[in-house]
Image: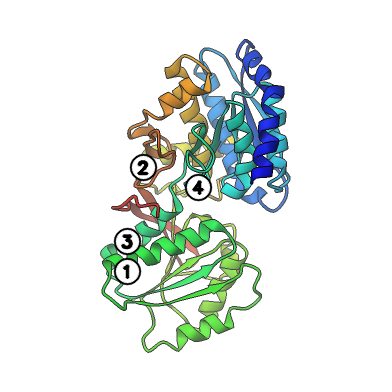
Amino acid sequence: MKNLQSFVAASVLATAASVTAAQAEDTVKIGFVMSYSGWFQQIDAATIKGAELAVAEINENGGILGRQIEILPFDNKSEPPLGADGALEVIGNGATAVMLPSDFDFGAPGAFVAQQNGVIALSGASDPKFGVTGIGPYAYSISNAAQSQGALLAEWALNEQGWDTAYVLLDNTISYTNSLCDSFAKRWKEIAPEGSLLGEDRFRNDDASIASQVTRIKGLEAQPEAIMMCSYAPGGPSAIRQLRAAGVTSPVLTGESLDGDYWIGIVPDLSDFYVVNYGSVYGDDPSEAVNGFFTRYEAATGGRADVSYALRGYSMIEAYATAANRAGSLDADAVSAELNKFDEEPLVIGNTTFNEDLHIATTRPMLVMQAQDGKFSAVGRFAASVGNLD
């Protein structure tokens, strides 16, 4: 990390003049330093399209400070170190804000460059470190923190569903899944009867088999009423398929990393599966603003969104444009000051609050989606009662 920060610091003098020059140009330039190719592309694709829709709609309504927004794309090829190169390139070409991948490890290299060059960094990372504590005061995530997602699911399972016992199955290959399951287990132990967390087990995303974990679950005196599984494709869907094939019928809960139905064919007739995300792509969201967004998204892109991440991309640009217009400036300090005043700001992703110390949502409601017989539908929006990020 020190080497990266030293590299970033060395770039400041080389690019600072470019930022100043950009503010005198005709367009407002926003860098999209994203995974346009590689394995992380499936995560970033909808975010990019959502952001592109925001740019088009904001431009139709006068742009930012009366100027049209121009996108400066850079493909990091799903290689995190290239994010620093990309940020340097787009900032050097005049970007006053940079959108980065929705993961701390992928987004941090570029965010450090943006921070050191006085440029706002935007992401959908669910790690609170993408903010003041991990990057600096110019870094903002539009997402809900992984820790709050885990707490939300624990409260929803116990209080809304009345499930009295649970089991945690963690794919511990990335920080998001670790934080998600850790927070679920912590919150469950705080609010559920002692001993009702029946076990905690681990696997790796590239494990071909979770037979031993399945055996331990089936060997319990009583089957858990809910299994909290923290994973992502392809390992997560494979694990669910193995659970169901072995006769484990307990409801499975998970976070946003298994959003969408692009993988559902791996688990035929998937049922009793619940995922928390930002909005339904099927037209049945409780929020008409979300339904309207996905109607416009389909018209603009020619196809239905397969994940809710497009809401994140749109709302990143929406938030930046709102703050810059209120600030009357593209200066990062002025824009950041306005972002930090957001108090239940009505963005398409939901009402959003930032302050000087916290640049990520912790108690904003999220949507619980249910899969039954291979089809998803919205259950309802719920919020964690606590915003603890420990």
Q: Secondary structure at mark 1?
A: helix
Q: Which residue is mark 1?
A: 189
Q: Would residue 158 be seen by someone viewing this image from the given angle? A: yes
Question: Answer yes or no: do the residues labelled 3 and 2 have beta carbons within 8 Å?
Answer: no
Q: Would residue 34 be seen by someone viewing this image from the given angle? A: no
Q: CA–CA distance between discs 4 and 2? A: 13 Å
Any mark on residue 156, and which? 3
Kindly identify the residue that appears in the image at 59 percent across and 57 percent down: 262
Mark in front: 1 vs 3: 1
Q: Secondary structure at mark 2?
A: loop
Q: Which residue is mark 4?
A: 308
* Colour basis: rainbow
Question: Vertically, is 205 above or below 119?
Answer: below
Kindly identify the residue that appears in the image at 41 percent across and 39 percent down: 358
Sequence-first disc among 3 and 4: 3
In front of the other: 289 or 20: 20
Q: CA–CA distance between discs 3 and 4? A: 20 Å
Q: Position of residue 376 (x, y in %)?
A: 46, 59
Any mark on residue 287, and which? 2
Q: Residues within 10 Å of mark 3 (few under 14, many from 20)?
A: some
Q: CA–CA distance between discs 1 and 3? A: 14 Å
Sequence-first disc among 1 and 3: 3
Q: CA–CA distance between discs 4 and 1? A: 30 Å
Question: In the image, what residue type sits under mark 1?
Answer: Lys
Question: In the image, what residue type sits under mark 3?
Answer: Trp
